[in-house]
Image (cartoon, rainbow, N blue to C red):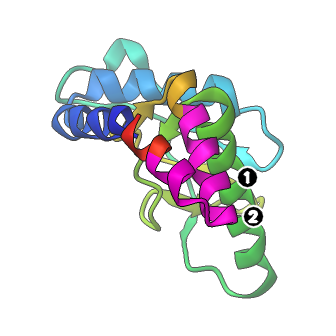
Amino acid sequence: IVGIADQFGMQLFGELDYIREANNCERFGELYGEWENVMVPDVCTPLTRKKVLVMEWVNGEKGPWPGDDGIKMVRIGLKCSVDQLMTTGLFHADPHRGNLLKTPDGKLAFIDFGMMADIDEEDRYGLFGLCIGLQNKDLPLITENLLK
């Protein structure tokens, strides 16, 4: 958990480096761009600089989305976020309504890749332990995983 907090702090200070953001977008696209209900914009790397980011325009609607569309978008977002935390370790650390769009074809588009975190395997296992401890109300397990 401490490692996750350290990553978050480092990302906060690096958020305005658009070369880094472009690289984050490309990495995220490699992992999630082929998902049936997820859209990740393409980056124009040759034109991107530290203070200029050039990427594909995304047509979409900011949430909240009413009715069944809203439920579908939340499900896609949760599935993708859980996979980020528990499987790949590349985590979009800023998934608010301004960074998630519902595209006209019903996909969830992720945008703004300035706040990303790489969560290593040991920290991901700590999250598993923390979740299990919380579910079982096991204070020693919770404490153990928070102090790692």
Residue 4 relative to residue 134: left or right: left
**Does the residue at mark 2 contact the one at mark 1 (Cβ under 8 Å)?**
yes
Residue 27 relative to residue 7: left or right: right
Residue 106 in the image, given as x and y percentages of width and height? 76, 62
Question: Which residue carries the number 2 mark?
Answer: 75
Query: Tag 2: Cα neighbours inside 10 Å, few (<14), some, or many (≥20)?
Result: few
Q: Quadrant of the N terminus?
A: top left
**Residue at horizontal 78 percent and vertical 69 percent from the top:** 72
Residue 39 magenta-highlighted:
no
**Which of these two is toward me, 140 or 105?**
140
**Residue at horizontal 68 percent and vertical 68 percent from the top:** 74
| Amino acid type, label 2 | Arg
Distance, label 2 to label 1, CA atoms, is 6 Å
Task: Count every numbered label the image shows and give the total.
Answer: 2
Vertical comparison of 122 with 92: above or below: above
Q: Quadrant of the C terminus?
A: top left
- From which residue to which does the magenta span run? 124-143
Residue 96 in the image, given as x and y percentages of width and height? 44, 63
Q: Secondary structure at mark 2?
A: helix
